[in-house]
């Protein structure tokens, strides 16, 4: 049973470019969460999605960030016009139920903005 | 004041020692309390969860929650070098999606 998959594992972007991060949840999970982890800081919740719906985006920056979880395919976190401050590790997690403590994390995508 | 406080360490212990990791929190609405283990350059792995107050044991690991003091602990008995990792506490309100994490405590168990 494959775990949560994220790609790419490492992504380098120049300031002003777009970053697209992909997350495939565990088989049978239809709830996806995105988190950001800055150096020496804990994970910060960004957004919670179900298939074709954004349920809670209270942790998402108001500009340049968007997320989707289409009916087919992985969940995508998109960051437009990246800035140096966007450099971080981005993790997605999936769960079998809504609002669940039982979240399984992927290996993360490490974004570096040069 | 942060909603979840966790001493970042680092904490270094000899193999076989009992390790105590702790978090405090300020929001009394938290109902689920989790401990995650994160190895370097990896994603967090759920170790244990507790609902409301009480103790929970799983092998060498024991989780304790004291809601009256807003204090949670994770104990690791007979610690092994393979336990060397960062340990993150996390908390969740009921019917809520916004899991709040501590900053993590970096643990090293020396052979």
Image (spheres, coloured by chain):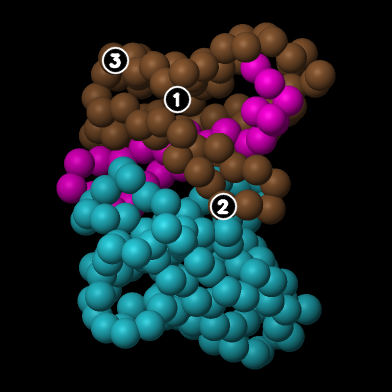
Chain colours: A cyan, B brown
Residue on which the image places disc 2? B43
A91 sits left or right of A27 in the view? right
- Which residue is farthest front? A1
Gap in angstroms between the C-alphas marked 1 and 3: 15 Å
Q: Quadrant of residue A67?
A: bottom left
Asked whether the viewer can see residue B1, the reply is no
Element carrying mark 2: loop
Q: Is residue A104 magenta?
A: no
User: In this figure, which residue is indicated by the disc labeled 1?
Assistant: B24
**Residue drawn at (62%, 75%), measured in percent from left and top?**
A8
Residue B78 visible? The answer is yes
Q: Toward which corner of the image does residue B15 lie, by quadrant?
A: top right
Magenta-tinted stretch: B79-102
Q: In front: mark 1 or mark 3?
A: 3
The disc, 2 or 1, on the residue closer to the chain's N-terminal end is 1
Residue B54 numbered tag: 3
Mark 2 vs mark 1, CA separation in Å: 23 Å
Q: Is disc 1 on the same chain as disc 2?
A: yes
Disc 1 crowd, CA 10 A, few/some/many (<14, 14-19, 20+) = many
């Amino acid at each position: 049973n494959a775990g949560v998959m994220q790609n790419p594992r490492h992504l380098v972007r120049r300031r002003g470019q777009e970053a697209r991060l992909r997350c495939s949840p565990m088989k049978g999970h239809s709830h996806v969460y995105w988190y950001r982890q800055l150096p020496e800081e804990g994970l910060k919740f960004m957004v919670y999605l179900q298939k074709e719906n954004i349920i809670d985006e209270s942790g998402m920056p108001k500009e340049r960030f968007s997320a989707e979880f289409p009916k087919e395919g992985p969940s995508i976190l998109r960051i437009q016009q990246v800035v140096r401050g966007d450099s971080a590790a981005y993790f997605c997690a999936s769960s079998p139920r809504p609002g669940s403590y039982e979240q399984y994390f992927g290996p993360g995508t490490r974004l570096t903005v040069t | 004041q942060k909603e979840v406080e966790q001493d970042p360490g680092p904490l270094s212990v000899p193999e076989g020692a009992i390790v105590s990791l702790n978090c405090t929190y300020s929001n009394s609405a938290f109902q689920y309390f989790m401990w995650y283990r994160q190895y370097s350059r990896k994603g967090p792995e759920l170790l244990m969860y507790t609902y409301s107050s009480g103790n929970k044991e799983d092998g060498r690991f024991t989780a304790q929650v004291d809601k009256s003091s807003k204090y949670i602990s994770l104990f690791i008995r007979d610690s092994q070098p393979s336990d060397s990792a960062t340990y993150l506490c996390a908390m969740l309100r009921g019917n809520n999606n916004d899991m709040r994490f501590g900053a993590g405590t970096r643990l090293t168990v020396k052979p």
